[in-house]
Amino acid sequence: MRRTELLRYARELGWSDPPSLPVITGVRLDEQATPATLEQLSEVANSCDRCDLAKRRKKVVFGEGSPGARVMFIGEGPGAEEDRTGRPFVGQAGRLLDGMIFALGFDRSQVYIANVVKCRPPGNRDPQPEEMAACARFLDRQIELVQPVVIVALGRIAARRLTGADKPLAALRGRWTAYKGIPLIATYHPAYLLRNSSDKPKVWQDLKKVAEKLGE
């Protein structure tokens, strides 16, 4: 990654000291040949080695769903099962997300699901700034290609990445903002809800706001 690109990504993500980030090499997403489809973008992502996450991954977890989805869900990064299967949000957290999607009147094939980073961070730790910067263009291009009506950020990492606000999720969820002109709302991550079921009613309130927005 060119240093100028990395600095731009860092500014977009709200980091106050971007020059401290390392320069990442091995860029394969040529500005002169921007992938025109999600399939083409996925092919580029599958060969990405921009950051150290590529060294440990089993599979790139690019994303899945309808290329014309009205709702796009964005989480933080793959876990162990996602790394094994190459699919986002599988296992218990995935089943809970399926329920959230169903509550909006859709099934999984009718929405689009992606993550801030496409490779699993070791031990399911939070993605690091340079890892999110390395994946920034992939996620941004996914959003550009899908052009959803609403983006739902799942969890603190995705909410901070998309809002640029360094605040607790409790201060970000349930409030409408926008990402590149697309209405954005943050809510709790399904994995968090598995540990904190008492917050499920709050997610339902957030989803009702999404439904209302879709009906406008």
Image (cartoon, grey):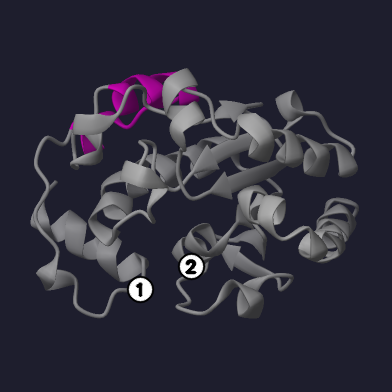
- Give the x, y percent position of residue 45: 32, 28
Q: Residues within 10 Å of mark 2 (few under 14, many from 20)?
A: some
Q: Are marks 1 and 2 in contact (CB under 8 Å)?
A: yes
- Give the x, y percent position of residue 85: 48, 19
The residue at 67%/35% (across/down) is: 92
| Magenta extent | 28-46
The residue at 48%/61% (across/down) is: 157
Front in this rendered view, residue 45 or 203: 203
Q: Nearer the viewer, mark 1 or mark 2?
A: 2
The number of numbered discs placed on residues in the rendered structure image is 2
Question: Which residue matches tag 1?
Answer: 14
Mark number, residue 160: 2
- Choose top left, top right, bottom left or bottom right for residue 28: top left
Is 36 covered by the magenta stretch? yes
Residue 59 shows up from this direction: yes
Question: Distance from label 1 to label 2 (Cα)?
Answer: 9 Å
| 186 left or right, relative to 214 | left
The residue at 63%/80% (across/down) is: 171
